[in-house]
Image (cartoon, grey):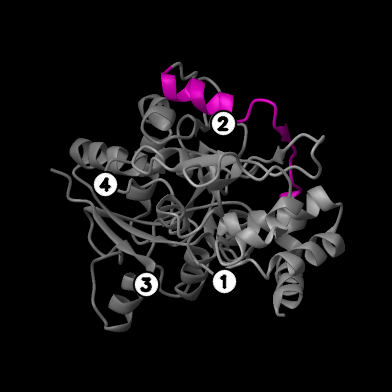
Amino acid sequence: MSRTRIITLATAVSLAAAGLTGCGTGSDADTVTVYSADGLRGENGDGWYDRQFKAFEEETGIQVEYVEGGSGEVVQRAAKEKSNTQADVLVTLPPFIQQADAKGLLEPYRPRGSEHVDVKDPDGAWTSLVNNYFAFIYNKKELASPPKTWDDLLDPRFEGRLQYSTPGVAGDGTAVLIKAMHDFGGQEPAMEYLGRLQKNNVGPSSSTGALAPKTNKGELLVANGDVQMNYAQAKTMPNLAIWFPAMTEDAKPTTFPLPYAAGLVKNAPQSENGKKLLDFLLSRKAQEEASSVGGGFAARTDVEATDPDAKTLAGLIEGVELFQPDWADVEKNLDTYVEAWKEATRG
């Protein structure tokens, strides 16, 4: 039985404040501590992380200590601990993985198999583990079809029943800004729209993963998310469905790649164990299970998944126009974008 210890970021902070060791401290030689954005762990212990961590522990005898939070949260925690590093591996979404690198939190390491990964840092600071795409979800029991356009979300029927996670804190929340700025053609029109949308928005949420259960129950009709996480959640949440907003009725919906990217933490307490885990997660076997177990897309280009889930996932983004954000620009200007969003939605 797996010895993996899974705790939330809030719990880890409480334990650290109480002066306790273990539980995400990486202090033991037979442990490896992972700080990760949510999405790859299953709701019932059946996700990609759950499967891979258990297999890694059985193969190596190294216990995985796992701390989960929003994409920005885990980077902020690692930055606060820079003088007393606790994590060995950091997994988060763009632009937060680039932000972690810019803050000097990552140690270059090229895991075995990374030569087959297209989306990675050229200097080895981080490597994609599971490919993914930004998305929205809706309750298909209460809505016969999803809203087609951004403007449809302004409908009064969504007042108090629409929510997206907090930009600058959650990776998928930040992705809302990125897609809006792309679709509306710039920061100013995007923020003007999000200001109008605020009348329907429930309010902030540091975790995108927490929005799916609310949508499945019908507390929310629409929320943001990503293909991997929501596809995996839909297996136990039958009312969830994935969609992508378009600008107009006649336009194609758009989205962009949003991979889970991992890096070795600089001055990690168990750096060698961190390297072993990264090698394991990029192994062919782990990557072959990215779709069937994780609901995502393999990061390795030499792994071609042919399972039914892989085919369904490919169908979800068929006909959707893909664009590639300038992550260097987003990382550089993220604070500006978030402040502009705060100003626009302040009311």
Q: Callout 4, which amino acid?
A: Asn
Cα separation between marks 4 and 1 = 27 Å
**Which corner quadrant holds the N terminus?**
top left
Can you say whether 331 is above or below 48 in the image? below
Which label belongs to residue 203?
A: 1
Q: Considering the numbered disc 1 on the image, is that residue within a helix, a strand or a loop?
A: loop
Q: Callout 3, which amino acid?
A: Ala
Q: Considering the numbered disc 2 on the image, is that residue within a helix, a strand or a loop?
A: loop
Q: Which residue is mark 3?
A: 10
Q: Quadrant of residue 35?
A: bottom left
Viewer-closest of 326 and 174: 174
Can you say whether 280 is above or below 305 in the image? below
Residue 213 percent location from the top left of the image:
40, 54
The furthest residue to the bottom? 18
Which is more N-terminal, label 3 or label 4? 3
Which is more N-terminal, label 1 or label 2? 2
Instruction: Please state the extent of the stretch shown in magenta in the rendering.
Output: 307-327
Residue at the location (33% across, 45% down)? 42
Q: Residues within 10 Å of mark 1 (few under 14, many from 20)?
A: some
Residue 55 percent location from the top left of the image:
24, 36
